[in-house]
Amino acid sequence: MALDTAIERPGGPLGLDDRVIGRITAIVPAMAGAFVALPGSEPDGFLPNTAGAAGLAEGTYLALRVTRGPQGGKGCRLAAWPDPADGSFKGPPRLLARGPGAVERLASLHPDAAILVDRPGLAAALPQTLRPRVSVGLGDEAGLAQAIWAALAEPDVTLPNGARFSITPTPALTAIDVDTGSATAEKRAKKDAQLALNRAIIPAVLRHIRLRHLAGAILVDPAGLAQRQRPMLADDFHTGLAADPVGAKFLGFTALGLGEIQRSRRAPPLHELLTGDHAAGLEALAALALVLDARPSARDRLAVSPGVLGAIETDSIALEQFRDRTGRTPSLYKESVFQDRYRPWRLVTDL
């Protein structure tokens, strides 16, 4: 059973605990902070007064740490990071160092877990302290890993007992609607059966909140219970959230009977990481690499949308890894219209 997930994209947007040089572009008293220009094409980040913006002037360069990754169409949340005594951390805006990688974060959460990688090069790239835990080859876990990631890309979750729930993110909150489905076919009284089923479903709901990095305001609509009965589920929410790594809290039930969860925003939610031009660009490169693994002399190319092309061209690390894996530079050309509007790229076979 999957417990945690993380995605690492070294050449992608800034992430949690990355360190950068930024420049103050605007002081915003109404927001108690300042906007900060960041390296490359990153959108401006926000530095609160309480995290180091107080007293700074527009145009100031300073070292910063990312405390919340970009999400919901907004840039990073930042905190000032002390300059060395020689004051060498000056402009222009640039990346100083990436924070802990995905494997490091997961290894810290699960110190007794083995680390499986599918290529020797990935093992060599890990910190020396983790290498005793590393094995090359996914073995029987390869299919399971693919199935888990495929399921996490979908908004609907069906449980073995026939119950299901749907996850709907919005800019303001995430709504989770529980449906007991075929699991309601019990001989107990409706009140007792529905209460038991909701209690059985809550752990799965909370696990998916964690797996998908859902955050901010989260509303859960239990299934089949009258509003006056729903507070009976409060202890189940409190217990299930007790071990949450970012300190999620259950706040109670609204007047409409919706369970309220507040979870700190840190890493971008999974549904944002799995969509967008950069995600599509990496998917396209992976598809082309698989073709070249099977047929090294193939002349296949990628037709990509303008946005995807820009994302690929600015990710120098992904391009370098593609060349290391295939021995070639990917052949790309821009195309604006695709038959599949959900996939802004396609493989073009040139025999």
Image (cartoon, rainbow, N blue to C red):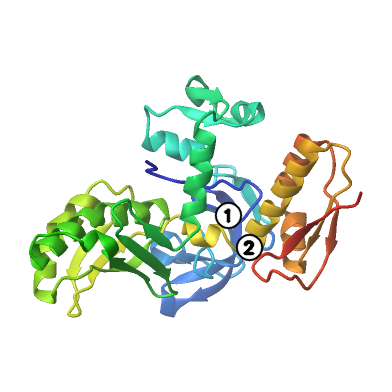
- Going by the image, does 4 lie left or right of 99? left
Helix, strand or loop status at disc 2: loop
Marks 1 and 2 close (CB-CB < 8 Å)? yes
Is there any visible trace of residue 68 in the rendered image?
Answer: no
Q: Is residue 240 visible?
A: yes
**Sooner in the amino-acid sequence: mark 1 or mark 2:** 1
Three-letter code for the amino acid on which mark 2 is drawn: Glu
Q: Residue at x 71, y 54 (%)?
A: 284
What's under tag 1, amino acid-wise?
Leu
In the rendered view of the protein, which quadrant contains the N terminus?
top left
Residue 26 screen position, x and y as percent: 56, 74
Quarter of the image where one finds residue 181: bottom left
In the visual, does 279 lie left or right of 224?
A: right
Q: Residue at x 33, y 61 (%)?
A: 164
Task: Choose between 187 and 241: the one closer to the eye.
Answer: 187
Residue 190 place in picture, x, y as percent:
11, 67
Which residue, given by chain and number where applicable, does mark 1 sit on?
A: 14
Label 1, secondary structure: give it.
Answer: loop
Residue under label 2, please give it: 42
What residue sits 52% from the left and 52% below the top?
A: 150
How many tags in the picture?
2
In the image, 18 versus 28, the foreground residue is 18
Asked if 128 appears above or below 57 in the picture, the reply is above
**Residue 244 % position (x, y):** 29, 49
Which residue occupies 76% across, 59% down?
346
How dense is the environment of label 1, judged by Cα within 10 Å: few (below 14), some, or many (20 and up)?
A: many
